[in-house]
Image (cartoon, grey):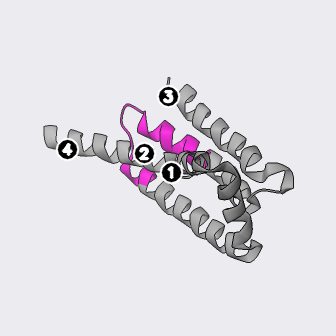
Amino acid sequence: MKYLVASLFAALQLLGFIFLAGAGHGWLAGAFSCLPFAPISFAAWFNALRAEPSLSISNYLLVAAGLVLAATALATRSEGTGHFFAYWRVQGILAGAIIALLYFNWIFACGLTWWRYRCKQLMI
C-alpha cells in the first residue's frame, strides 16, 4: 500500500511537470521544480506510511523541499513573474488547487510522520 500511495504522488508530480509547462508557454520554473519534487514526495509518503516512520528522514526531506522551493522562487524571478501570473489568469482557481497539491503534498506526509511520532511518544 505504501508503495502505491508514494508512487501515485510521485506520478502526480511528473504530470504536474507537463501541466505547468504548458507546451513551453506556461510557468517553466514551476514545471521544472516538479522534477526534484517527485522523489521528495515519494520518499516523504513512503516514510510516513512505514510501520515506524523516521523523524530524521522527514526533517531532511523538509530541508530538501525547502531548498527546491527557494530555487523555484529564484527561477520564477529570473524567468519573469509574468509567466506565473499569466498561468493563474488562464487557469483561475484550478491553478491554486493544482499548485497547492503539487507543492505541498510532501508537507502533509511530513506532518503525518510527525503526528505518528508524537502519538507514539505519548503512548510510551
Contact between marks 2 and 4 (CB within 8 A): the answer is no
Between the C-alphas of marks 2 and 4, the distance is 20 Å
Asked whether residue 124 is in view, the answer is no
| Residue in the picture at 68% in, 75% down | 77
Q: Is residue 70 above or below residue 92?
A: below
Query: Which badge, 4 or 3, comes first in the chain's sequence?
Result: 3
Label 2 environment density (alpha carbons within 10 Å; few <14, some 14–19, many ≥20):
some
57 and 39: which one is in front? Answer: 39
Contact between marks 4 and 3 (CB within 8 A): the answer is no
In x, y percent, where is residue 57?
A: 45, 51
109 lies left or right of 77: left
* Residue that numbered label 1 is attached to: 104
Nearer the observer: mark 3 or 2; the answer is 2
Q: Please name the amino acid that badge 3 sits on.
A: Lys
In x, y percent, where is residue 26?
A: 77, 56
* Residue that numbered label 2 is attached to: 108
* Residue that numbered label 4 is attached to: 121
Between the C-alphas of marks 1 and 4, the distance is 26 Å
Label 4 environment density (alpha carbons within 10 Å; few <14, some 14–19, many ≥20):
few
Contact between marks 2 and 1 (CB within 8 A): the answer is yes
| Residue in the picture at 42% in, 39% down | 48
Between the C-alphas of marks 3 and 2, the distance is 15 Å
Q: Which residues are magenta?
A: 39-58
Nearer the observer: mark 4 or 3; the answer is 3
